[in-house]
Image: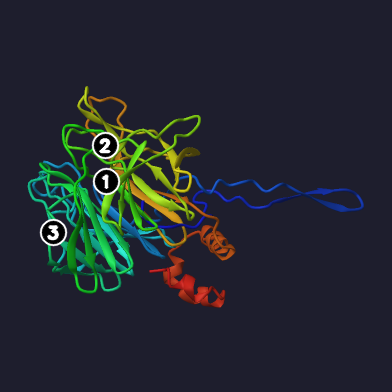
Amino acid sequence: MANRPTAYERDSSDTDESTNTKRSKQTQVAVEQPLATVNLMQFVEVTPCGSKAQPHPRSGHRAVATYSDFWIWGGYFPSHNPERPPMFAELWRFNYALRQWTLEPTTGDAPDSTVASHSMCVHRNHVFVFGGTGYPFGRNVSNDLFMLDLKRLQWKKLQLQNQQPHPVYGASLIGKGDYLYVLCGTDSWRYCSDVYEIHLPTLCCTQIGYTFDEPEDTTGNGRYRQEALIYGDKIFLFGGGSNSGLAFAFELLPVFDLNERRWSFVHTNPDPIHNFPTARKFHSIFPLGEHQILMFGGANFDQTAGIHTVTEAYVWIFDFEKLEWSRSSSSMIQPTYFHAAAMNRRGEIWSHGGVIQRSTHDLPDERITSIYKMHTKVPDLTEVCWDRFLNCLADRNVLISQPHLLTQLNIPVQYLERIR
């Protein structure tokens, strides 16, 4: 899970105080209707405005969220057409204010073929991308670290010093202070739970953790497409997949201590009614307040049928203080796995694409290009007003075509800077 959010935005309907007026011969009486409530911690589908191009349906891509935009990089869509490769080495930007996708041209030394199940994070205003696989999966696997400047749209391949992580896809990449941490992953043959620490000022890379014995899977160790989060001085792992196809459960969580530089396990407590979340991989987690995370999406592997099945639609919450799981009343509109999700500083979670469950196992997997949003905290009143203003516009393109109107309306500069 990995960022933080805001709260109130309505994408298709408005919930405002309304006034009904009853007239008598002498007086006019205003009868106030109660305000309708809005569950901010609920996914809504966001429909892009206009007829501009949007990303092709895909899975295995990754995302980051900035103050004004949601960015996705890479992805996969099955293709037997030589004119349309199955991998997407492309950068798309979704602007929140305009609600429009833009395919951004980039320069520099970018990942060109290993653009599925790479790991990606935004740290100190730069985007970092590590590892990934090409197609066929596992044939071409990367251990390179790239940096993307989102202002210049320029890639740079970083030359790590001292040590180089093994080539992997499905790793986790998270940042803290002057360091990035790379955890777990696979090259399709070897699965690991190694930990590498990268000192950003010097690019010195050091292996500080080694693969632990998996108590759930006796066929082999290591995991991939897990989710990781730093809480205090510890990195918690949530779920992931093994070399047998098994998805890891959530009763026992692996924890890496950054000070002692070793792995251990913590036992967690179930929801008193709903027990533990379904074991899963290809899911997402994000911070919720100071001491919790929320989790959604993912899949587990049906070894009898030999297929992946989408997990339940519910959003789950884990409390680090209580080490306890609880199932929230919120749920995904369309349960997915291999989607790309990210959270911005306002606390908005944005999720794009992924694989959805077919009604019958006889049909191939279906990938989508829908985009969803959910809030994790109540927004500032200024954000509510900005949202209301945007929702009142018949055509959001006026934000670009008539910028002088925004100046005349005294829209604060920080909101004008989000439009591009």
Can you tell which mark lies on residue 334?
none
Can you tell which mark lies on residue 366?
2
* SS class, disc 1: loop
The mark nearer the N terminus, 2 or 1, is 1
Position of 410 with respect to 351 (left or right) is: right
Position of 120 with respect to 24 (left or right) is: left
Can you tell which mark lies on residue 57?
1
Mark 2 and 1 residues: CB-CB less than 8 Å, in contact?
yes
Image x and y of residue 201, in percent: 24, 74
Q: Give 134 or 1, whichever is nearer the viewer.
A: 1
The mark nearer the N terminus, 1 or 3, is 1
Classify 10 Å Cα crowding around label 3: few (below 14), some (14-19), many (20 and above). Answer: few
- Residue in the image at 25% along x and 49% along y: 56
- Select label 1 or label 3 by which is in front: 3
Name the amino acid type tagged 3.
Asp
Which residue lies under the disc numbered 3? 112
The mark nearer the N terminus, 2 or 3, is 3
Image x and y of residue 49, in percent: 41, 55
